[in-house]
Amino acid sequence: MRYALIGSGMMGREHVRNIALMPGAALVALSDPVESSRAETAALAASRGLGMPRMHEHHGALLAAGGFDALVIASPNHTHHAIMVDCLATPAPILVEKPLATMVDHAWELERMARSRAAPVWVAMEYRYMPPVARLIEAVRAGEAGALKMIAIREHRFPFLDKVGGWNRHERFSGGTMVEKCCHFFDLMRLLAGAEPVRAVGSGAHDVNRLVADAHGAPADVIDNAFVIVDFANGVRGCLDLCMFAEGAWFQEEIAATGDRARVEAKVPGPARFWPGGAERASEFIVSPREPKAPLREEIHVDETVLAAGDHHGSTFYQHQRFLDICRNGGAPEVCMRDGAIAVEVGLAAEKAIRTGQPVGIDIAGR
């Protein structure tokens, strides 16, 4: 399987490390406007046995050269729309990083463009594939929580990392924290709820991280802490608790789904290299029934090679396994363009709710 990569920064390199774990894979081309990023990622690919890819400054040149079987897009958020318009015109399967776009109209435009396409497009929602989160999804679907009523997601973590040009620290490039970071969580809420979102309410601010001008000439303007509630059409409600100045938290993500029978939880440590303790830790899966019965509690360990390939607790690896399977054998993507577009819509509704202090309605009907 000959992959081509568009965007060779931090997330692009995570994709390379995981593609290298796929049997029979090669990276034949990559594009990025930053020469140092191109060179570093090409060297990484070669060192991981993927071959030395052709390097292009612009994605248009990569597409024109051809010679690839699948495309992976990991460029900055604000470039996704223009790049995807061009990539959708190719016959290749596509794995595109979240968020699908930074504007609602752009996200739905791309979704409509992909409807008539024969090859699949998979939107990279890695958090679905973290082993403890996948176990939680499985448990909820199996009815272990009973009739689901509430979803609570807490992410307490480190600030946004330094990326080229500081694009992830500015709303106009990233779409805002609720889009850049939290579209994962709104996607999880919708997946667990099994219904469409109808309203977002939020409170948040930019209180701690990068309050003064940095090397790029401007202070960050993205939210660094928030509470958001999302109501779903079937009465399920989800709550997000986000703090991006909590590096020392033992678990980075804590996800709970509570129904009329039990509370089901997944607890996920953050990447060891960003945690002050500096060591890998096991994740946990817990089922706490309402009846007077001891909870089920188990540690979930992820293969060290898989953990070392990325910063998302092995999820990028498992996502790539599934993407490769449909590239080779056919089938529909587990995370489709509609999923990606709705995650953007909810993220932007949450941004608006936080910045205006007012509830924001979400109408997916007819999309």
Image (spheres, rainbow, N blue to C red):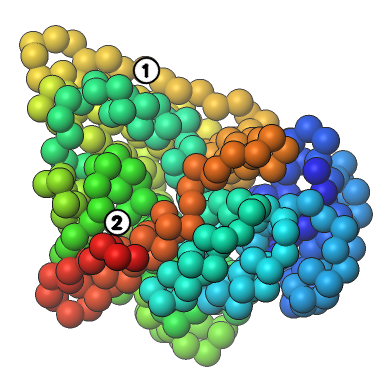
At a point 41% along the width and 54% down the height, the residue shown is 339
Which label sits on residue 298?
1
**Dot 1 lies on which element?**
strand
Front-most of 223 and 249?
Answer: 223
Tell me, yes or no, if residue 271 can be seen here: no
Residue 93, percent across and down? Answer: 68, 53
Above/below status of 122 relative to 297: below
Front-most of 343 and 326?
Answer: 326
- Left or right of residue 267: residue 101: right
Above/below status of 225 relative to 239: below
Amino acid type indicated by mark 1: Glu
Above/below status of 367 relative to 191: below
Disc 1 crowd, CA 10 A, few/some/many (<14, 14-19, 20+): some
- Left or right of residue 46: residue 337: left
Residue 119, percent across and down? Answer: 65, 52
Looking at the image, how many numbered discs can be counted on the residues?
2
The residue pinned by badge 2 equals 242
Amino acid type indicated by mark 2: Leu
Q: First in sequence: mark 1 or mark 2?
A: 2
**Of all residues shown, which one is farthest toward the bottom?**
217
Say which quadrant the N terminus sits in. Answer: top right
- Left or right of residue 128: residue 294: left
At a point 29% along the width and 65% down the height, the residue shown is 366
Q: In which quadrant of the rendered view does residue 71 lie?
A: bottom right
Disc 2 crowd, CA 10 A, few/some/many (<14, 14-19, 20+): many
Q: Are marks 1 and 2 in contact (CB under 8 Å)?
A: no
At a point 17% along the width and 25% down the height, the residue shown is 146
**Dot 2 lies on which element?**
strand
